[in-house]
Amino acid sequence: MPKLFCYGTLNVHAIQRELWGEAKDGVAGVLMDYEVKCWDSSAILYVEKCMGEKVSGIIYDITTDQIRQSDLYEGSEYERVFIDGDFWVYVRKDTIIRPAPIINKKLTKRERKALKRARKELSDVRI
């Protein structure tokens, strides 16, 4: 089953239910040597290569049909790339992408609280 690293709205259960027909619980992951940026001063996120930085996210087991739905949701501005031979991640098409490792790890209490807060904030976003 393919794995998808998510760092933004695809972590919102309401969006997952709409796209995939179910809400998923994934595994915490870190995308090394990338950072999250906002697109044109908006709330739209993307990742970009940046040595020494890291992006926290969630890794989901996802079906090929769910991947197709995610591709449609992300649109033509994003490209799905295979990172470290194991995971897919959506990146802005006009950024240079080089493979970087994703490290699975257990979230600390602080990281769990931050993720919960981010999910709450993202759940208020209208698409």
Image: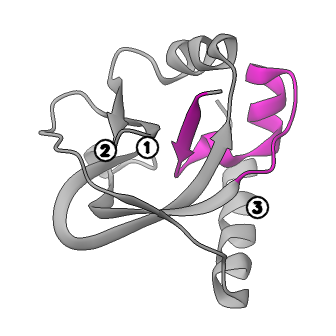
Sooner in the amino-acid sequence: mark 2 or mark 3: 2
Residue ID at (16%, 44%):
98
Determine if residue 102 is in view.
yes
Q: Which residue is mark 2?
A: 39
Sooner in the amino-acid sequence: mark 3 or mark 1: 1
C-beta proximity under 8 Å, tags 2 and 1: yes
Give the amino acid type for the residue marked by disc 2 in the picture: Trp
Q: Quadrant of residue 51?
A: bottom left
Q: CA distance from mark 3 to mark 1?
A: 16 Å
Decide which of 67, 15 is in the foreground and name it: 67
Is 36 on the left or on the right of 93, as rendered? right
Q: Which residue is mark 3?
A: 120
Determine if residue 124 is in view.
no
Dot 3 falls on a residue whose secondary structure is helix
Q: Quadrant of residue 104?
A: bottom right
Location of residue 45 in the rendering, given as x and y in whole percent from the top left corner: 41, 47
Give the amino acid type for the residue marked by disc 3 in the picture: Lys
**Mark 2 crowdedness (10 Å alpha carbons): few <14, some 14-19, many ≥20:** few
Residue ID at (58%, 36%):
3
Dot 2 falls on a residue whose secondary structure is helix
Residue ID at (54%, 12%):
72
Location of residue 17 in the rendering, given as x and y in whole percent from the top left corner: 84, 29
Quarter of the figure that contains the N terminus: top right
Q: Which residue is mark 1?
A: 44
Is 46 on the left or on the right of 66, as rendered? left
Give the amino acid type for the residue marked by disc 1 in the picture: Ile
Dot 1 falls on a residue whose secondary structure is loop
Q: CA distance from mark 2 to mark 1?
A: 5 Å
Magenta-highlighted residues = 2-26
Location of residue 114 in the rendering, given as x and y in whole percent from the top left corner: 65, 77
Image: 37 above or below 116: above
Location of residue 118 in the rendering, given as x and y in whole percent from the top left corner: 65, 65
